[in-house]
């Protein structure tokens, strides 16, 4: 078997594994700094696992085309290396789904982590396959999406006219008072979902207000402060997905 024909040497294997480890680890380090559920080691391991799977596919292909060729011809065996990659991508779907959790106030967290893991696995597959020219640009683009674009996305959401507020208040009758404040600021209520908060064994009503601010007054902070100043309101928080 002439492994050199495909650069499938020990040095090549080591380089591919190291490339998958380093590139995935760099992405995972950024997630660790943000205290996400899947961080440095998780991303490294998924990248290594993906690279190993495609290396195994290449190894079996070389063996079936070389030392095992006579057996393959007699048995009539067919081999598709792409099935390894397909199974890896299917498997990481379960891992990614596990990182998506529901948090308070009907919010979901972990979608970005899940998609980051998926992208990291694809990058590991590219590393293991020896598609080097693809790995570095992919890593830079994934870092751009996860780290650089994150504050820009938050800024955009805070400037958006649609706003979601979680408000704790004294009594259900206070809902009319809160809605009147929204109307005074020329805002429009798109929907209200009621909840209940338990503090110090006391139950307080609360609600999630979906609002649309006016073109003339799109300030999120002004709307928050106006509602927070109401005597009947215990707390107000803007929910950013």
Image (spheres, rainbow, N blue to C red):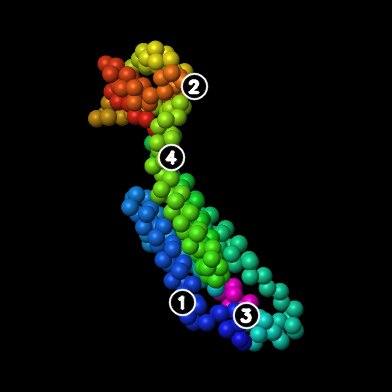
Q: CA distance from mark 2 to mark 1?
A: 57 Å
Looking at the picture, how far across and down is residue 101, in whole percent?
Answer: 43, 45
Relative to 96, 224 lies left or right: left
Binning the other alpha carbons within 10 Å of mark 3 as few (below 14), some (14 to 19) or many (20 upward) gives some
> Looking at the magenta stretch, what is its main secondary structure?
helix
Q: Quadrant of residue 153?
A: top left
Please name whichever residue, 25 or 160, is drawn nearer the observer in this view of the structure: 160
In terms of sequence position, does the residue under pointer 3 or pointer 2 come before the other?
3
Residue found at x 40% / y 49%: 147
Q: Please name the residue that numbered disc 3 is placed on.
A: 62
Looking at marks 2 and 1 on the same chain, the residue that comes earlier in the sequence is marked by: 1
Residue 191, image x, y percentages: 48, 22
Q: Are marks 3 and 2 in contact (CB under 8 Å)?
A: no
Residue 170 visible, this angle: no
Q: Quick one: SS at disc 3?
A: helix
Q: Are marks 2 and 1 in contact (CB under 8 Å)?
A: no
Q: Residue at x 42, y 30 (%)?
A: 159
Tell which tag, 4 or 2, sits nearer the viewer: 4
Secondary structure at numbered mark 1 = helix
Q: Quadrant of residue 208?
A: top left
Tell me if residue 108 comes above or below residue 163 in the rendering: below
Q: Which residues are magenta?
A: 56-61
Q: Earlier in the sequence, mark 4 or mark 3?
A: 3
40 lies left or right of 138: left
Q: CA distance from mark 4 to mark 1?
A: 38 Å
Mark 4 = which residue? 153
Q: Residue at x 50, y 78 (%)?
A: 12
Q: Position of residue 225 (x, y in %)?
A: 31, 22
In the picture, the disc for residue 190 is 2
**Could you tell me how far apart the alpha carbons at marks 3 and 1 are, in whole angstroms?**
18 Å
């Amino acid at each position: 078997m002439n492994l050199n024909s495909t650069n499938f040497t020990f040095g090549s294997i080591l380089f591919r594994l190291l490339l998958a480890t380093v590139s995935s680890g760099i992405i995972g380090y950024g997630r660790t700094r943000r205290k996400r559920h899947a961080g440095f080691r998780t991303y490294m391991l998924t990248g290594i696992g993906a690279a190993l799977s495609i290396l195994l596919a290449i190894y079996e292909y070389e063996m079936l085309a070389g030392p095992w060729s006579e057996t393959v011809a007699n048995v009539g065996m067919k081999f598709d290396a792409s099935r390894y990659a397909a199974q890896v991508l299917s498997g990481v779907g379960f891992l990614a789904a596990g990182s998506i959790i529901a948090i308070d106030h009907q919010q979901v967290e972990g979608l970005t982590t899940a998609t980051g893991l998926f992208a990291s696995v694809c990058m590991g597959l590219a590393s293991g396959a020896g598609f080097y020219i693809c790995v570095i640009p992919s890593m830079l683009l994934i870092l751009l999406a996860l780290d650089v674009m994150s504050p820009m996305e938050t800024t955009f959401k805070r400037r958006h006219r649609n706003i979601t507020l979680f408000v704790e208040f004294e009594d259900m009758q206070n809902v009319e008072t809160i809605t009147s404040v929204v109307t005074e600021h020329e805002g429009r209520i798109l929907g209200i979902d009621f909840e209940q908060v338990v503090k110090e064994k006391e139950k307080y009503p609360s609600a999630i207000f979906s609002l649309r601010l006016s073109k003339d007054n799109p300030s999120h902070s002004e709307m928050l402060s106006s509602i927070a100043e109401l005597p009947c309101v215990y707390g107000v928080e803007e929910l950013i997905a």
